[in-house]
Amino acid sequence: MSNRRELLERIIAESQRNYAAYVLFNQAMADRLGLHPTDLQCVALLDLESGPVTTGHIARLTGLTPGSASRLVDRLEKAGLAVREADPADRRRALVSLAPGVRDRIGRAWDEPGSAYAEVLGGYTDGELELIAGFLRRTTEVGLAQAERLASADR
């Protein structure tokens, strides 16, 4: 077997292990915060957005149906993690954003894990970090495209 083929197989295996470890970590963090893992994931995704988003956008981010995304937002709102406001451009729609103080509350839970991840990343050069960031962005794009393809094949 060629060295490249072995390396590609290793990358695939490590990616699967990384995904499995992240799922376990996300569950443990959600448990620590008293949240459902999907709710925590939504909070993390809302934190990455540049501003408030619609429930439909949340459905696309999470892969949930619009009804399930609406119930997720209901739970986040009830837990004090998100706020809904009327869309000034279209009063029939609501915009969702993180509630004030949520970044600090969730951020405190991330202190130790964040330090551990930062320690790992600290061992890489800037060039290596650029490579890692590019790999993550590109594989995210592929994953989203494949999820969309699989979902549309079911329709």
Image (cartoon, rainbow, N blue to C red):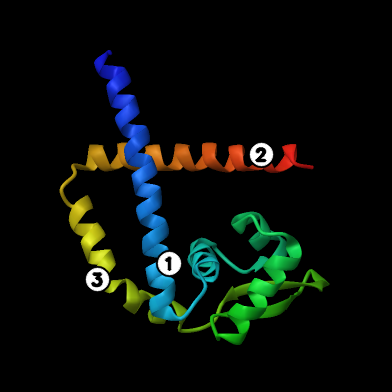
Dot 1: few (<14), some (14–19), or many (≥20) neighbours within 10 Å? Answer: some
Residue at 66% from the left image edge and 39% from the top image edge: 150
**Residue at 73% of width from left, 37% of height from top?**
153
Q: Tell whether 45 sits left or right of 110.
A: right
**In x, y percent, where is residue 103?**
43, 76
**Which quarter of the picture shows residue 77?**
bottom right
The residue positioned 46% from the left and 37% from the top of the image is 138
Q: Position of residue 126 (x, y in %)?
A: 22, 42
Q: Amino acid at mark 2?
A: Leu
- Residue indicated by mark 3: 112
Q: Is residue 151 left or right of residue 97?
A: right
Residue 27 tag number: 1
Where does the image place residue 123, in percent across and percent down from the top left?
A: 15, 48
For discs 2 and 3, the disc positioned in front in the rendered view: 2
List x then y, in percent, for residue 85. Answer: 70, 79
Task: Identify the residue at horizontal 49%, vertical 43% (top origin).
Answer: 140
In this figure, which residue is indicated by the disc labeled 2?
150
Q: Spot the residue most to the top.
A: 2
- Quarter of the rendering occupied by the N terminus: top left
Q: In this picture, is 3 found above or below 107?
A: above
Quadrant of the image containing the C terminus = top right
| Dot 1 and dot 2 residues touching (CB under 8 Å) | no
Where 151 falls versus 53 (above or below)?
above
In the rendered view, tell whether residue 133 sits above or below residue 88: above
Please report whichever mark, 1 or 3, sits nearer to the chain's N-terminal start: 1
Q: Could you tell me the amino acid type at mark 3? A: Glu
Q: Looking at the picture, tell me which residue is in the foreground, 79 or 57.
A: 79
Which amino acid type is marked by label 1? Gln
Q: Residue furthest left?
A: 123
Q: Secondary structure at mark 1?
A: helix
